[in-house]
Amino acid sequence: MKLYLGLSENSLPNQTRIFGELDGRLVDLQMACAAYLTQAEGDKANAYELASYYFPETLAGFLEWGEPAQKLLDQVMSFVTKSGVRELRGPGGEKLAYDSTDVRVLPPLQNPQKSFVIGFSDRARTEALPPAEIPTGYYKLPQTFVTTGAPVIWPKFSQELDADGGIAIVIGKAGKRIAPEKAWDHVAGAMLIIDITARDINKREGLTTNNLLGKNFPSSTCVAPALLLGKDKQNLLALEVELALDGVVKQKFALRDCVFTVEQIIAHWSVLGIKPGDWLAIGASMALQGDRLQNPVSLKIGSTIRCASKTIGALSHQVVAAGGLRR
Amino acid sequence: MKLVTFFYDEQERIGAIDQSGNVVDLINAYASYLRIDRAAEAARLAAAALGRDMIEFLKRGDKAIDAARIALKHAVTDGGADNVVERHRVRLMAPVPRPGALVSAGKNFSDHVAEMSSKTGPVAPVAFLKLPGSVIGPEDDISHPPEVKNLDYEVELAVIIGKPCVDVGLHEAMDYVAGYASFNDISARDIIRRENKSGIHLMGKSFPGFAPMGPYLVTSDEVPDPQNLKLWLRVNGETRQDSNLTYMIFKIRDMIAYWSQMGLNPGDVLTTGTPRGVAAGRKPDQVPWWLKPGDVVEAEVEGLGCLRNRVIAE
């Protein structure tokens, strides 16, 4: 099950809705839930209120409800399937299914407290360096998030931009100091990420073991397009991601390529406490040939980068100069 | 004006400190000033004018600052005294309890660079992000996590941004400051060392409680020369850091101009870096010395009020 966050033609500004995908259409889950409660449960009086309770304006809010909300999601989606996604309307006749082009899709998790990329973590990368002892990471500010279709804006301060694909593990259940064997219980699912780096700045910042400006500028974090729900370990480990530059595949990546396991990463970072909607991305993807820093996916103005997986979908972004296509 | 975020009657609120040190509830005082018969409508209008939290307040810019001055004056002089709460009855939170970005400078005082055995100062401003979730108030406890062996302090100045700030020049940089607060950049030196060996540091600066800030946001009009303020830190009454912001390598305006390249927003916080005297580098200490449960850490920047946080075992 893939979930999106977005605005439809019926949304007021800031009134984001959670959407599910069915037969290529995006279903407004709050409205679909209201329809389900009205028709299937005969509970018309509270339908809208209950629906907005379980399918609120944020995906993190939905994840916080845990298992009951996920069960309700399954019931709502099978109700929509049975009723027919093209015919079904809300309790008051409202539209609830949209063409994907009629929904403005947003980064699904707008304001996580922890949005970390685990660095130095793929085998190809670490062959050139002493092995990392712990899965260190860096923080990507929520203000840098964009999702598919949005331009990647070349920052004025950099001459050297590159891209890395990866997988973000999304947390579904709060915890602190989580034991490795319990780690998967805290996973909600996964989404895609492209981590854009201003490499010239990043190299300079690296000399003082920092990385801030080189990793945190507007549109430097491309995420989603969807949150793929499901904490089945084998399914997530089987995810294969490709990063292509202008149609040529440059990186291929799976979680199994990481020198640290998902269990180790969650155990390590949950020392700080983790919450639904937080994410830990295993990025710094494996280049097709050798060390990624020797073969970076270097960007130019006008380049198109695409990060895709069969099950999650694709992020596609064009690189533009600040103020337009030309520098 | 001294602006605060405080917790009272089970609710987070924004306030201002009056001349006797008590806390004026800004939304309630402004609602009372509006003199509208229907209380609910007055409260709604006041909340719309001021915002419900400090970031919402700062986003409203000078209009909200003006409304806050009116509310403060009303509470003190015009019979709005119902909206003043005695200082001891509230818990002060950090003035910005959840900054969008908390950018902390490293290696930014010449005396501190020397004590940490760095050969040269940085060529451009150096900073790292502390997680917003590490922010605590001026009287809250600093938790000593069981994973940490070398817990350290760093007194700094917090500069709170008041306007959207992108690619600003040095000459205009200070116009983007809403105000200032005392700040303590709590650091787990052993964790940082270990992180640096494998990559970069993040966790060692960002445990919950590692960023005491406050007690007030002192508006910039009351801090005419922020680059020339004393700052000091005491542990259990003993002075361990004692310096002046004049020794910063990259000045406040340099930091704002540089970090505005990534885009800063109202309520984002820049901290200046710390002077000499941190536990990790302090020369008079014969044996290594670190913060331990029970210690009381007082950090203060001249004129901005004192942070007094006790270290407790987590």
Image (cartoon, grey):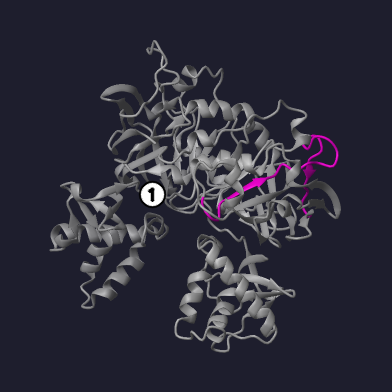
Q: Is residue B6 left or right of residue B169?
A: left
x and y, in percent, of residue A288 in the image: 84, 42
Q: Quadrant of residue A207?
A: top right
Q: Residues within 10 Å of mark 1 (few under 14, many from 20)?
A: many
Relative to A25, say whether A273 is above or below. Answer: above
x and y percent of residue A212 in the render? Answer: 58, 40
**Residue B71 % position (x, y):** 24, 61
**Which residue in the structure is indicated by mark 1?**
B96
Q: Residue at x 52, y 36 (%)?
A: B203
* Range shown magenta: A275-302
In-image side of B274 versus A306 (left or right): left
Q: Viewer-proximal residue, B172 or B273?
A: B273
Name the residue: 55% across, 25% down: B193
Viewer-closest of A210 and A320: A210
Q: Residue at 85% across / 55% down in the picture?
A: A247
Q: Is residue A1 left or right of residue A128?
A: left
Quadrant (top left/top right/bottom left/bottom right) for the N terminus of chain A: bottom right
Residue at position x 28%, y 70% in the image: B43
Vertical order, B37 against A216 (above or below): below
Q: Residue furthest front?
A: A181
Identify which residue, B176 or B114, lies in the foreground: B114
- Which of the 4 image quadrants contains residue B64? bottom left
Q: Given the current orientation, which residue lies at the most extreme top position?
A: B286
On screen, residue B154 versus residue A302, left or right, reads: left
The picture quadrant where one finds residue B174 is: top left
Query: Which three-letter amino acid code belongs to the residue tagged 1?
Result: Val
Identify the main secondary structure in magenta: loop
Q: Is residue B198 visible?
A: yes
